[in-house]
Image (cartoon, rainbow, N blue to C red):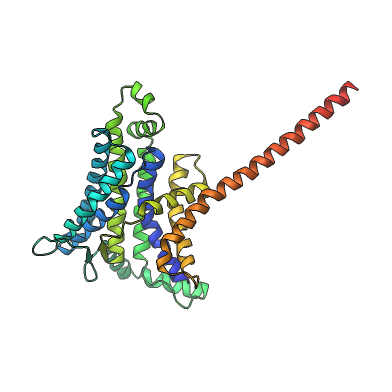
Amino acid sequence: MFTALFGSVEQGIIYAIMALGVYLTFRVLDFPDLTVDGSFVTGAATAAMMIVLGYHPILATITAIVAGFIAGCMTGLLHTKGKINPLLSGILMMIALYSINLRIMGLTAENAIVRPNIPLLNSDTVFTQFQSFWGNLGIDTALTDFLKNTLGLKTAPSTWGTIIIVLIITLAIKFIADWFLKTEVGLAIRATGDNKRMIRSFSANTDTLIVLGLGLSNALVAFSGALIAQYSKFADVNMGIGMIVIGLASVIIGEAIFGTKTIFRTTLAVVAGAIIYRIIYAVALRIEWLDTGDMKLITAVIVILALVIPQVLEKQREKKRKAKRRIERQHELAQGGNRLA
């Protein structure tokens, strides 16, 4: 059980990068971007294709980020220059990316063909490199023995390089996002999401800001896709289906639990929400009458609960506040009557 939860935390930290990208569009820009389902696969396909062709995993990952940025910018251009509805812009780009992703994965063959997946079982990835590094230092063995001896676990994860590197990367992106959203450009993007007319009155180019915001968002999504492909040891054209729902679930769960008072707190909530989502999902799949085919149902139920429960709790708190104010008002009226008497 512990090993399964450990794997869920690893995946949750990687998916948190994608959730941060979703947060930028849905919360900051107020743009319903469905490009995510396609750009996630674009990142995975690009990274996998370059790794198979012999490029360094880090260079492959950086290229995947650039590909995701371009995809996001194209969605922004469809909306700003093509005057297409935001939702439809994302849908059109998502559909286009499906074919593009097939072509990207086909580049690994001698003659470029349409290819639905790329295996990475015997390929070197960023995770195998860091696992080897931590293993040579003896950290993996030390941490595993510590857990077994301290907590009395019969089995414990034997590789810690993965969770350490993804945690460092995700936290670095979280802090960079915090800093960026407080810069002049970041504040302009936030203002564009809040009120386009107001920011235009200050002579700001909202079209450029929207394109930039969507590009950065999908760059993060593609980055997450590239890491997931290297973590799972394969890239598949259908691995991005439902990513937007997972991203929204992570954002909603995090905000419901940790709140949104500051940028720092909100981005931290998004990261925590992604981890909590993966843990809930892993626990749900351990129920006997559920299997992997119920993944989408589990996701839908988690999102529904995350949306409904905070509203119910808020209504209860509001009733308590009204009751308290009513009692205070009655007490004040009683005191006023006593003084008059």
At a point 48% along the width and 56% down the height, the residue shown is 302
At a point 46% along the width and 44% down the height, the residue shown is 266
Question: Picture coordinates of residue 27 (x, y %)?
Answer: 41, 40
Question: Picture coordinates of residue 177 (x, y %)?
Answer: 36, 43
Please, which residue is most extreme toward the bottom here?
154
Instruction: Please tell me which residue lies in front, 279 or 290.
Output: 290
At a point 86% along the width and 25% down the height, the residue shown is 337
Instruction: Please tell me which residue lies in front, 139 or 211.
Output: 211
Q: Indicate whether 75 appears above or below 235.
A: above
* Image quadrant in which you'd find residue 235: bottom left
Q: Is residue 34 left or right of residue 66?
A: right
Instruction: Please tell me which residue lies in front, 285 or 294.
Output: 294
Instruction: Please tell me which residue lies in front, 320 or 129.
Output: 320
Please, which residue is most extreme toward the right here?
341
Q: Is residue 91 left or right of residue 316?
A: left
* Image quadrant in which you'd find residue 340: top right
Q: Indicate whether 198 appears above or below 25.
A: above
Question: Picture coordinates of residue 228 (x, y %)?
Answer: 31, 60
- Dividing the image into 4 quarters, which one contains the C terminus? top right
Count of labels in the image: 0
Question: Picture coordinates of residue 117 (x, y %)?
Answer: 23, 64
Please, which residue is most extreme toward the left here?
111
